[in-house]
Image: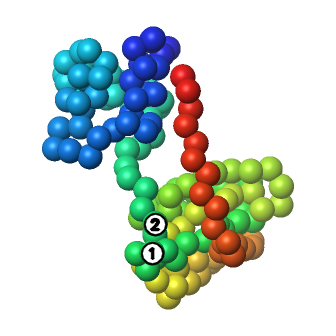
Amino acid sequence: MLTHFDKKLLNVIQTKLPLESRPFARVAELLNVDEKTVLERLNYLKEQGYIRRFGAFFDSAYLGYVSTLAAAKVRTEKVADVAKAINAYPGVTHNYEREGEYNLWFTLLTPNQAEQDRILESIRILEGVEGLLSLPAIEKYKVSVEFNL
């Protein structure tokens, strides 16, 4: 269960995590605690599944990367195996099961189109995959999401 402090901490790190050598020391100052407390609570929140990952967002297209949203039609009994195989690719940023004919969706970010095509083809031939759609963005929209806890 999230404590009041946990909620304050999560609110701060969403948009106010500073880019400096000891960012969590600065967060600790903002919350009037010590750095050790911040790090311990963040580790706890990660272990409990409240935090999935920390990382910066970069404009991948500006850096030359290509991305796509992909939808796979996977036999029900193979969804877990296929999802695990898909997650093994370092360029997969999200992977989730959905209801419907195309029941496994994921995003893929690669350094170039050839690498993306190679990975998608290797997924297409996995046992249990009956179809695969690649749905690259035609126009990009950036929506900033901040959860106020």
Residue 32, percent across and down?
26, 15
- Residue 69 visible to an observer of this rendering: yes
108 vs 98: above or below: below
Q: What amino acid is found at the position of numbered circle 2 in the picture?
A: Asp
* Callout 2 secondary element: loop
* Callout 1 secondary element: loop
19 vs 131: above or below: above
53 vs 43: above or below: below
Q: What amino acid is found at the position of numbered circle 1 in the picture?
A: Tyr
Q: Relative to 78, is 3 on the left or the right?
A: left
Q: Relative to 113, is 55 on the left or the right?
A: left
Residue 19, percent across and down?
26, 46
Q: Are marks 2 and 1 in contact (CB under 8 Å)?
A: yes
Q: Residue furthest left?
A: 21
- Taking depth in this image into account, of 126 and 97 the one nearest to the observer is 97
**Mark 2 Cα-neighbour bin, 10 Å: few <14, some 14–19, many ≥20:** few
- Residue 40 visible to an observer of this rendering: no
Q: Residue furthest right?
A: 100
Q: Residue furthest top?
A: 4
Residue occupying image coordinates x 19% and y 22%: 36
Report how far apart the C-alphas of labels 2 and 1 lie in the structure: 5 Å
Q: Which residue is mark 1?
A: 62
Q: Relative to 29, is 130 on the left or the right?
A: right
Residue occupying image coordinates x 58% and y 77%: 120
User: Where, by quadrant of the figure, is residue 136 drawn?
Assistant: bottom right
Q: Residue furthest bottom?
A: 114
Residue occupying image coordinates x 83% and y 55%: 100
Residue 39, percent across and down?
25, 27
**Which color scheme does this rendered protein use?**
rainbow
User: Where, by quadrant of the figure, is residue 73 drawn?
Assistant: bottom right
**Mark 1 Cα-neighbour bin, 10 Å: few <14, some 14–19, many ≥20:** few
**Dot label at residue 59:** 2
